[in-house]
Amino acid sequence: PMTRIYIKLLLTAIFWGGTFIAGRVIAGHVNPVAAAFLRFLVASVFLVGLTLKNEGLPRPMDVKRVLALFLLGATGVLAYNLFFFRGLELISAGRASLIIANNPIFIALFSFLFFAEKLTPLKIIGILISVTGASLAISGGNPAALLTRGLGMGDLYILGAVCSWVTYTLIGKRAMNRFSPLAAVTGAAVTGVVMLFIPACLTGMAAEIPLYRPMDWAAIFYLGFFGTVLGFVWYYDGIRAIGPARAGLFINFVPLSAITLGCLLLDEPVTFSLAIGALLVITGVILTNTASVRMLKRRVV
């Protein structure tokens, strides 16, 4: 059974790496707002079914629970996906995945700022290494160039996705007091779909849907089912079986899978700066997570 858990976690990382490929496939063919709406429409259908099967009907909602779902949907679904799909119209899947791989770094920083969580020397070293790696990847091996020419719009959009996810995660820390993980993700997905419906219609989704290619529909289904539903369920199966610290280490395979799949399926070049940047980002994230695990163990003891 434990081998099966590890296989599921590895596949989850590959699925999540594949979301960058799927995003690139539909880039320029599906409007970012429509892509976000359709992705989470697919995901919501399966998530609602899973939630009803596993947890039954939701209990009555109070104002605080409604507000929590609104904020989770606005940040983790609406904002994140609009930035994500817009960014993937402009930059490669591998490059985008390396920027988003810094999510744990920004979560650690903002947890320090807003929740007074300690920044240990190991965490600080991890943050510096990871940011250096991302800078190398973004700048093509010349971080100093970022000071003169700045970040490109694609990079800024993906950084917007990072900020959205960090906000979603920090809100989620409080929301988990009111919801199970499955109910929180399902509620956020449904809320996000409702928020995206009118903007998607206003951007001409109904007129464009007949023009979508079969591969566009395949990518949308992949994003909704494999990248969202199956990835979420298997990841939380792993957390229940081996704990969040060990399960979280598998997330480091996401940029590796995105870069590999981008090379194999989209002919995206794997440059020296991208490879070194990936190594540094993953090293930095591992160090930051290791520091977090040590702090958690001390609290438990």
Image: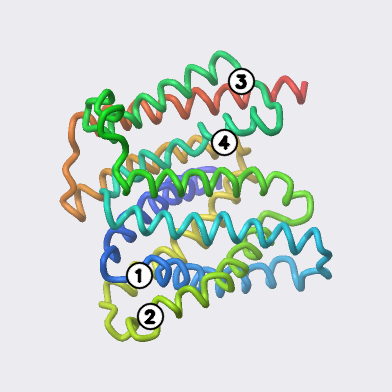
Q: Are marks 2 and 1 in contact (CB under 8 Å)?
A: yes
Gap between marks 2 and 1 measured at Cα: 9 Å
Task: Name the kind of residue labelled 4 in the image.
Answer: Ile
First in sequence: mark 2 or mark 3?
Answer: 3
Residue at image x 70%, y 27%?
A: 116
Q: Are marks 4 and 2 in contact (CB under 8 Å)?
A: no
Tag 3: Cα neighbours inside 10 Å, few (<14), some, or many (≥20)?
Answer: some
Gap between marks 4 and 2 measured at Cα: 36 Å
Return the mark for residue 107: 4
Left or right: 4 as drawn, with respect to 263? right
Task: Name the kind of residue labelled 1 in the image.
Answer: Asn
First in sequence: mark 1 or mark 4?
Answer: 1
Q: Position of residue 67 (x, y in %)?
A: 73, 60
Q: Is residue 211 above or below residue 61?
A: below
Nearest to the eye among marks 3 and 1: give it.
1
Q: Is residue 261 above or below residue 47?
A: above
Q: Which of the 4 quarters of the picture holds residue 277?
A: top left
Q: Which residue is mark 3?
A: 119
Return the mark for residue 13: none
Gap between marks 3 and 1 measured at Cα: 40 Å
Q: Is residue 238 above or below residue 111?
A: below
Left or right: 10 as drawn, with respect to 180? left
Q: Which structural element holds mark 4?
A: helix
Q: Position of residue 213 (x, y in %)?
A: 25, 77
Task: Name the kind of residue labelled 2 in the image.
Answer: Gly
Q: Nearer the viewer, residue 216 or 205?
A: 205
Gap between marks 2 and 3 measured at Cα: 47 Å
Q: Which residue is mark 1?
A: 31
